[in-house]
């Protein structure tokens, strides 16, 4: 099979993926690969512990080791496109035909990433890994959770200010804090006289996809933030999640760059072409206690 690789196809997929990815700037991409095992490692915290140096007792200046500072990351999302288009000759293929299919793949992948990212945040706040299982005792995040608060009859801005103060006390850096809201949460924020809306925001913040700022947070909207916190009669609708990119990580990579493959002699079709690509991704939360959730 003749294979035609075009780097511009990959760039086009990523452009549309970014466009639909509401959580694009909410996660960092800081991870390392363990050379011995081949697994990805995510830092649980961005800090290091300082020691007090002793000039009179040099033996007490022990070497510190990076123990429990990393968690293994399993890539659990593997998406592909293998689309057959009949009636096209690979030697005279209109770029727009392929571009349209890749645009749709990028858009769909962005939505899938958002869904996974937000589910990972919700799970971590509840002391669970991205698969929804309680953190095991060997995990540095064991018995750690985020904080869930209820809006109740309180003013939304007052509650945002309270959460901002609580995050400060928890050691979360003031720069780069964000909140992601759903439709109901967005309505509460935009009704507040304290919200700074898009027309008043800097171009840099608008380019990141924020729709407003309030109480020190950049505000992002996603319809993928759904569901309830709790079960039964105590269940309350989720309105918003508050966090910081230092404490959550996204991993993404093409396994197969977008390509166009001649279908002749494939054993699957006569004539036509295949549009193919494959991308993997996942998310991890390194410090659940750095995140807050607001419910109704």
Image: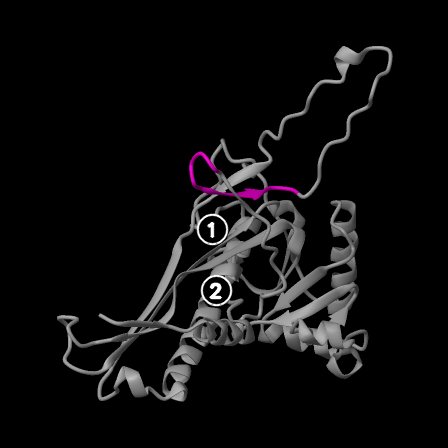
Q: Main secondary structure of the magenta part?
A: loop
**Eye-nearest disc, 2 or 1:** 2
Q: Quadrant of the C terminus?
A: bottom right
Left or right side of 230 for 258:
left
Q: Report which residue position mark 1 lands on.
A: 130
Q: Residue 197, relative to residue 175: is it above or below? A: below
Q: Is residue 73 visible?
A: yes
Nearer to the camera, 134 or 44: 44
In this picture, which residue range is highlighted in magenta?
35-45
250 with respect to 77 (left or right): right
- In depth, the one of 47 and 89 nearer the eye is 89
Most distant residue in the right direction: 56
Vertical side of 216 occupied by 85: above or below? below
Residue identified by numbered label 2:
113
Q: Is residue 212 visible?
A: no
Distance from disc 2 to disc 1, alpha carbons, whole Å, reads 13 Å
- 82 and 143: which is toward the camera: 82
- Residue at position x 66%, y 71% from top? 208
Residue 122 position, x and y percent, is: 54, 56
Q: Is residue 52 magenta?
A: no
* Residue 269 shown left or right of residue 41 in the figure: left
């Amino acid at each position: 099979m003749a294979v035609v690789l075009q780097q511009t196809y990959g760039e086009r997929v990523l452009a549309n993926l970014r466009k639909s990815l509401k959580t694009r700037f909410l996660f960092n991409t800081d991870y390392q690969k363990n050379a011995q095992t081949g697994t990805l490692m995510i830092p649980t915290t961005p800090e290091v512990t300082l020691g007090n140096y002793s000039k009179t007792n040099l033996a007490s200046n022990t070497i510190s080791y990076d123990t429990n500072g990393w968690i293994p990351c399993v890539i659990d999302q593997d998406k592909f496109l293998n689309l057959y288009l009949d009636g096209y000759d690979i030697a005279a293929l209109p770029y727009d035909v392929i571009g349209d299919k890749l645009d749709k793949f990028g858009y769909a992948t962005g939505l899938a990433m958002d869904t996974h990212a937000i589910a990972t945040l919700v799970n971590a706040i509840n002391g669970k890994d991205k698969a929804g299982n309680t953190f095991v005792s060997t995990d540095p995040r064991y018995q750690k959770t985020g904080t869930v608060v209820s809006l109740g009859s309180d003013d939304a801005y007052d509650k945002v200010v309270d959460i901002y103060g609580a995050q400060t006390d928890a050691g979360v850096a003031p720069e780069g804090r964000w909140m992601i809201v759903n439709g109901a949460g967005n309505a509460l924020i935009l009704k507040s006289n304290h919200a700074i809306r898009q027309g008043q925001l800097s171009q840099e913040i608008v380019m990141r996809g924020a729709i407003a700022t309030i109480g020190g947070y950049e505000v992002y909207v996603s319809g993928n933030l759904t569901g309830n916190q709790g079960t039964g009669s105590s269940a309350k609708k989720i309105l918003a999640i508050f966090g910081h990119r230092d404490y959550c990580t996204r991993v993404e990579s093409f396994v197969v760059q977008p390509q166009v493959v001649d279908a002749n002699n494939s054993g699957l079709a006569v004539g036509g072409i295949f549009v193919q690509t494959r991308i993997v991704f996942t998310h991890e939360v390194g410090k659940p206690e750095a995140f807050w959730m607001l419910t109704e």
